[in-house]
Amino acid sequence: MSSPEERLKELGLTLPEVVKPLASYVPAVRTGDHVYVSGQIPMENGKLGATGKVGAEVTLEEAKRQARVCALNGIAAAAQAAGGLGNIVRIVKVVGFVASAPGFTDQPKVVNGASELFGEVFGDAGIHARSAVGVAALPLDVPVEVELIAEVR
């Protein structure tokens, strides 16, 4: 099986720079053999990928793509805290927050964008416990935010 670095390359992806915090927190904290990654928003090249509520201004498909961007940002933050991508042993827990229009109930499908990327990058070690939560609003009006816990060496 190829390494996470090789799988990223095969997917045509590179780890982005870690997104700077929007307030008084750090992108990730390592304690013992775990890294706790703060909620990651869909920033690409320093710009927001989308804004608005899923089921209104943002389609399910676009929100799923934005969740994938959040996951890639989360991998970058985890790798930085772990001392490199190769030090991530597995993705343990993922929580996805979806800014949802009234009546929108497909939050799990949106967060699948993140979960699927973790599986593509880490294989079986990317299979994780997860929550997908609908919320009224997220910072900067983003449609999705993803946080994670990773086991590291």
Image (spheres, helix red, strand yellow):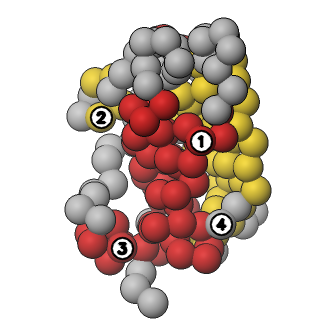
Vertical relation: 95 (above or below) 122: above
Disc 4 target residue: 127
Q: Quick one: SS at disc 4?
A: loop
Q: Quadrant of the C terminus?
A: bottom right
Q: Which kind of residue does numbered mark 2 sit on?
A: Glu
Earlier sequence position, callout 1 versus callout 2: 2
Q: Quick one: SS at disc 3?
A: helix
Instruction: Identify the mark at residue 146; answer none if there is no mark.
Output: none
**Residue at point 40% right, 40% down?**
65
**Residue at point 66% right, 9% down?**
102
Tell me how far mark 3 sits from mark 1, CA to CA.
23 Å
Tell me how far mark 3 sits from mark 2, CA to CA.
20 Å
100 sits left or right of 40 in the view: right
Mark 2 crowdedness (10 Å alpha carbons): few <14, some 14-19, many ≥20: some
Earlier sequence position, callout 3 versus callout 1: 3
Mark 3 crowdedness (10 Å alpha carbons): few <14, some 14-19, many ≥20: some
From where the camera sits, is residue 131 visible? yes
Disc 2 target residue: 44
Instruction: Identify the mark at residue 7; answer none if there is no mark.
Output: 3
Disc 1 target residue: 109
